[in-house]
Amino acid sequence: MVRNVFLSAGITARILVILSIMLLAGTNMACHQDDYVVYEVTGDADVVDILITTDMGADGKYEDVPLPWRMEFGGFDSSYVYLYAHNNSDSGSINATIYVNGRVFRQAATSRPYDTVVVYGEKNN
């Protein structure tokens, strides 16, 4: 239970830092409501914690998720996409991928136990 409290605090701090950087970078790109966004986490880790930005810009949090995991959004309103995946296992790999309109937008992987990958960015429309 204590680990989850620290993990939640770590997730919140990382999100705040990343969102601050993205806001400072500017928002000059238009967002199209017909964008199709897919978040995907694969690998052979037992379970992972996942945090995403949803189609309305809110956070979606999923804990102790078995792999593979996939979430799809049609009509994605937010111009920013964000995917955080944390390996909750002492072994195994995780691969995190964001697709925008069928193309790989961002991708990262790790094979270290209890490691984290984060992929994010502003969609190019």
Image (cartoon, rainbow, N blue to C red):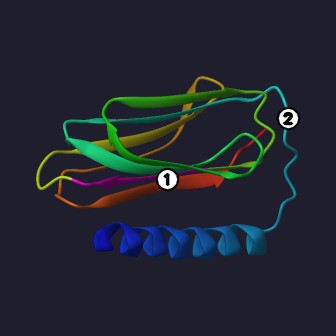
Q: Is residue 108 above or below residue 19?
A: above
Q: Is residue 35 above or below residue 10?
A: above
**Residue at the location (33% across, 29% down)?**
68
Q: Which residue, given by chain and number where applicable, does mark 1 sit on? A: 119
Residue in the foreground of this view, choosing between 75 and 89: 89
Q: Secondary structure at mark 2?
A: loop
Q: Is residue 76 above or below residue 117?
A: above
Q: Quadrant of residue 107?
A: top left
Density class for disc 1 (Cα within 10 Å; few <14, some 14-19, many ≥20) is some
User: Label 2 amino acid?
Assistant: His
Residue in the foreground of this view, choosing between 99 and 68: 68
Residue in the foreground of this view, choosing between 105 and 42: 42
Q: Which quarter shows the C terminus?
A: top right
> Which residues are drawn in magenta?
82-88
- Magenta region includes residue 85: yes
Density class for disc 2 (Cα within 10 Å; few <14, some 14-19, many ≥20) is some
Q: Which quarter shows the N terminus?
A: bottom left
Q: Which residue, given by chain and number where applicable, does mark 2 sit on? A: 32
Q: Is residue 8 above or below residue 83?
A: below
**Percent x, y of residue 24:** 76, 75
| Mark 2–mark 1 distance (CA, rounded to whole Å) | 21 Å
**Percent x, y of residue 80:** 70, 51
**Residue at the location (88% across, 45% down)?**
30
User: Label 1 amino acid?
Assistant: Val
Mark 2 vs 1, N-terminal side: 2
**Percent x, y of residue 78:** 77, 46
